[in-house]
Image (cartoon, rainbow, N blue to C red):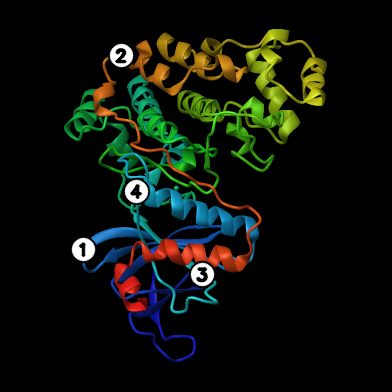
Amino acid sequence: MATLVEPPNGVKPKGKHYYSMWQTLFEIDTKYVPIKPIGRGAYGIVCSAINRETNEKVAIKKINNVFENHVDALRTLRELKLLRHIRHENVIALKDVMMPIQRIGFKDVYLVYELMDTDLHQIIKSPQPLSNDHCKYFIFQDLYTVKCLVSVNSCPLILNYCEFLDLGFDELCSRLVAKNRRLPLLRGLKYLHSANILHRDLKPGNLLVNANCDLKICDFGLARTSRGNEQFMTEYVVTRWYRAPELLLCCDNYGTSIDVWSVGCIFAEILGRKPIFPGTECLNQLKLIINVLGSQQEADIQFIDNPKARRYIKSLPYSRGTHFSLLYPQADPLAIDLLQRMLVFDPTKRITVTEALLHPYLLGLYDPRCNPPAQVPIDLEIDENMGESMIREMMWSEMLHYHPEAVSANA
């Protein structure tokens, strides 16, 4: 639980109070009252809290020593910039970024998000059975929107799995239609892609769910702008099990199809209740993919621009592959058809989000009129080589968007 404590130096700054959770000190605005910690990661700790001004429950993420690691600082800045611009019902809402006491020298960043009940990873690994209708529901949730809370991992605060999964498909759809929230994951993903945004780290833990049948995409620290033929840095992207072949093969040019591959891996995990490609490292990951998809023809590896990577694929032992219907014998044949169109080795032949939304498996669920594209593309241009002082100043500028009173005070 959260414990109210005295300031570390005995002086209480105006508008701040201090709480201890999991042996970590939180310096937060007095309008927020912490309830309890709900998640821990390399970034720090997430706690649930109540906004006393609105009586709304929120999630507060403390990012410890944000400037200690240059890459982490850039990820935080990128997420701040992106979530300030995105307003979509299937993307986690960043409600506030707390202003530090001092402009120069602050080390920690406190992000305030809407509070969700759990994530798709927790639902998949729960013992409750998932029917074909539940699989359909979650995949159209996925497609209709593609932690942000960097994967809160486990936060079953309200959601009762049994009650949630016992809902019939008609009830699930009626709740969604009543809220005009059909096909959330694909819908959200389509929105992001229309804004030229690649998420680049889609996985069950980054898909938050609540008891109202809402699904929201989170964790945008790896997101980038897609600009056609743009070359990206060959950096860490996408958790390995959900990483597309073109990323595993270090291709410089890639696009929105990497997110579609990730959704396909998530879909397979929903169907089978376990990851489809649980590789131990990159080469093993490729072998697992080839074992399922089968050896690729010459025409299917033309996208590989790295000669060494192409030779490696050719050197793998011949595999006939395994049909998805054998891996998931209980699955709807239309679900199998959609899955095999998502998990295509060649990204140029992979189904697009729009095509997936129109697939017969989701027949009657998608209405393009209810899913307008982003009005303008979002620019995430950030100089990867900028120093700490510049990153700090840009973070401060992002914070000011949530605190107009601070702008007036500094004017």
For the residue carrying disc 2, how many other residues have a C-alpha within 10 Å: few (<14), some (14-19), or many (20+)? few
Q: What residue sits right under mark 2 in the picture?
A: 363
Q: What residue sits right under mark 1 in the picture?
A: 55
Q: Which of the two marks, 3 or 2, is nearer to us in this view? A: 3
For the residue carrying disc 4, how many other residues have a C-alpha within 10 Å: few (<14), some (14-19), or many (20+)? some
Q: What residue sits right under mark 4 in the picture?
A: 117
Whether 109 is drawn above or below 118: the answer is below
Q: Earlier in the sequence, mark 2 or mark 1?
A: 1
Residue 373 spot, x, y in % from top left: 34, 31
Q: Earlier in the sequence, mark 1 or mark 4?
A: 1
Q: Dot 3: what SS?
A: loop
- Quarter occupied by residue 130: top left
Residue 400 spot, x, y in % from top left: 38, 66
Q: Dot 4: what SS?
A: loop
Q: Quick check: marks 3 and 2 in contact, CB under 8 Å?
A: no
Pick the quarter of the image with the N terminus.
bottom left
- Quarter occupied by residue 290: top right
For the residue carrying disc 1, how many other residues have a C-alpha within 10 Å: few (<14), some (14-19), or many (20+)? few
- Residue 71 in view here: yes
For the residue carrying disc 3, how many other residues have a C-alpha within 10 Å: few (<14), some (14-19), or many (20+)? some
Q: What residue sits right under mark 3 in the picture?
A: 108
Whether 8 is drawn above or below 24: the answer is below
Instruction: Give the distance between the C-alpha atoms of the residues marked 4 and 3, in whole angstroms.
Output: 25 Å
Q: Earlier in the sequence, mark 3 or mark 2?
A: 3
Q: Earlier in the sequence, mark 1 or mark 3?
A: 1
Q: Dot 2: what SS?
A: loop
Residue 203 spot, x, y in % from top left: 51, 37
- Residue 42 in view here: no
Q: Quick check: marks 2 and 1 in contact, CB under 8 Å?
A: no
Whether 51 is drawn above or below 201: the answer is below
User: Is 366 on the left or on the right of 295, as rendered?
Assistant: left
